[in-house]
Structures are given as C-alpha cells and as structure tokens.
Image: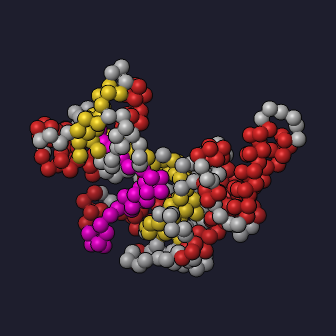
Amino acid sequence: MQAAVIGLMQSGKSTLVSAISGKALPQAGASAIEEAVVAVPDERVDWLTELYESKKITLATINCLDVPGFNFTDEHGRAAARRYLLQLRTAELLVLVVRAFEDDSVAGKADPAGELTELKTELLLADLELVAKRIENLEKQLKKPGKGQTKEKAELELFQKLQTVLEQEKPISSGIENDEQRELIRQLGFLTSKPMVVAINVGENQLKEKIELGDAVDENIPTVQVCAKLAYELSQLDEASRAEFMKDLSITESTTSKFVNCCYEALGLISFLTAGPTESRAWPIKKGITALEAAGKIHSDLQRGFIRAETMKLADLKELGNEKAVKAAGKARLEGKEYIVQDGDVILFRFNV
C-alpha cells in the first residue's frame, strides 16, 4: 500500500512521517520525494507470535511518500508542486497534512481549514489539466476514421462530464457512476479520485482540543489529529520511557496507530491473520473479499488449488487458550470459496497443488 503525504511548507508533514516510520528527518530544503516504510501496529499478531512461538513476525506496512512541502505563493512554487503531483498518480492514498499549531519560527497564523482548501484546489486543478489534455486528444482521434470511434465517443462524453464536475470544484470520484467508467479512468490516476485522509497537526498545548475544519473537509474523509513534534520526540525514546511519558500526558493511542487506522478506514481495509511456528502475519485486504480471493493474497497456488479455509475467531483463541481447544469446542470453521473474510479471522488455507 502506498500513501503520498502532502502539505504546505512547514506544516510538519516530514516530522510526522519520521515519527511514525523511524526514518531520519530529511535535510532542510530537500527537493526530492522521500520514501519511508511504516509498520502497521497489530497487537493481535504479537499475541499470536507468543502463542505459536513463531520464529518470525510479519506486520503489514504502509509505504509513505514524503513529498516536499508545497509553496503556492509564486509561479515557481506552483510549477514545482505540479511536478510533484505528477509523480503521485500511482499512489493509492493521499494524506493531506495541515497546520493547526502556532510557532514563532513559522510565518503566518495557523489556518488548517484554509490550507486544506488550498491543497484540494490544487489537486482539482491538476486533474482539470489532465482531463483537458485527454479531451483534446480524443477530439483529434475522432476526426480520423477508425473502428474504435464508438468507444472513443463514449469516452469523450465521460471526460467532458468530468471536466464539468471539476469546474464545479467537485472531485472526479463524484462524477463516476459505475465500474466501467472507473476502469476507463483508472490508468490516468486522477488525484481527486483517490481516497484521502486529513491529518491536522496540532501543538502540544492542543492535545485535548478538537480542531474543526467546517466545510473544508467532506464527511466521508477520515480525519485525525496528531502532534507531529511530540510524536517525533516520543519516537526517539526507549519503549519504557515512551510508555511513561504517554501515561503522564494521558495519551492512550500512539500516533502511528491513529494514522494507520485512518488510512485503513479510507481504503476500506481489514486484516486477516495467519499463524504457526514458522511465522505469524497480518494480511491487509479490502472489506468484502472472499476466502478464495484472500488465499490469492498469500500465493496464487493457494487460490488455484483452494479447498477450504479453516477459520477461527481470535476471541475464541484467547478465551480457550490454544488452537486444539478451539477445535475441541467446535469453534473452528471450515469455510468455502464464497465466505466473506472478517477482520481478525485467523485462517489456515487448505489447498491442493
């Protein structure tokens, strides 16, 4: 999973990425997109590793692209931002970081709603430019006789409709009505068709304050409040000291966990689990995926030779103590291809090569 983390200059975006990934802060003035891997915290996998005495633990990960801060105050800054945005069209998720903290070293008063509106406008403009180019190309193609004109006409109608949607300051996603249209635009990687998360970066004195963004954020976009500076400072401590400081500050959930949960919500992801003496592991999948499709996430051989999914609920494992006891209690289920995998299912796939 790849998430592009964007924001204005001095929004604290890079500090957030460093805090949750453990990667060193980029040098001031960095002009390249940096990559950082964030391990997805999952206490369920930790517990299974202990139960099965697994030699290896494998957590899910989010590959974060830390994009240099945008500056829209002049044409040079806008041109640089457009170049960066072109590189983000393959990302699965956009994380928009906005500043809510006040700092004497940062110019201007914090305006998280204003920053969010500015970022969303630039995403719309980038998509509008791409749509206009596609319309121009399709119109040229239609002037030449060919077998594919029926398809091209339908595509042109769709892109003209999407152009109108963007001009009304609405995201591309609001103009897509079915899977066929979704497939038509998929390869172009429109930014406003991607799931989004908004991260509001607050100061340490705002930890208990609820920052409102009003109409700047849509209801269906997950929003998370973080204090990137504090999270980074905590990430530099050993585990015991970090736990003590978090307790003193009444922090019950890590910034990494809050960030990951929002990303999973935006992408519609859950995790099923596999466990054994060799490895315990979390496998992120889309909600609604069948057992057959989940098997394919592990290996195509499992999907091709699928027989059954031997499934247990983690709660049953915890209550009864081990796999043998769950089976003895009749709570291990043999599920078929069409079973819809649930979050936290512990699965052993039976297959025949």
Q: Quadrant of residue 105?
A: bottom right
Residue 247 position (above or below residue 318): below
- Answer with left or right where residue 14 lies relative to residue 339: right
Residue 87 belongs to the span the image colors magenta: no
Where residue 39 appears, as percent x and y from the top left, is: 39, 49
In the image, 310: left or right of 129?
left
* Highlighted range, magenta: 245-274
Seen in the picture, residue 232 relative to 47 is either above or below; the reply is below
- Nearer-the-camera pick, 204 or 167: 167
Picture residue at 84% right of the left edge, 41% below the top: 142
Q: Nearer the viewer, residue 87 or 44?
A: 44
Query: Residue 348, position in %: x, y?
Result: 27, 34
Residue 338 screen position, x and y as percent: 37, 38
The residue at 22%/33% (across/down) is 277
**Between 176 and 102, which is closer to the camera in this rendering?**
176
Residue 1 sits above or below residue 337 on the image: below
What residue is shown at x 65% (from left), y 57% (from top)? 175
Q: Is residue 90 left or right of residue 207?
A: right
Is 271 magenta? The answer is yes
Residue 19 shows up from this direction: no
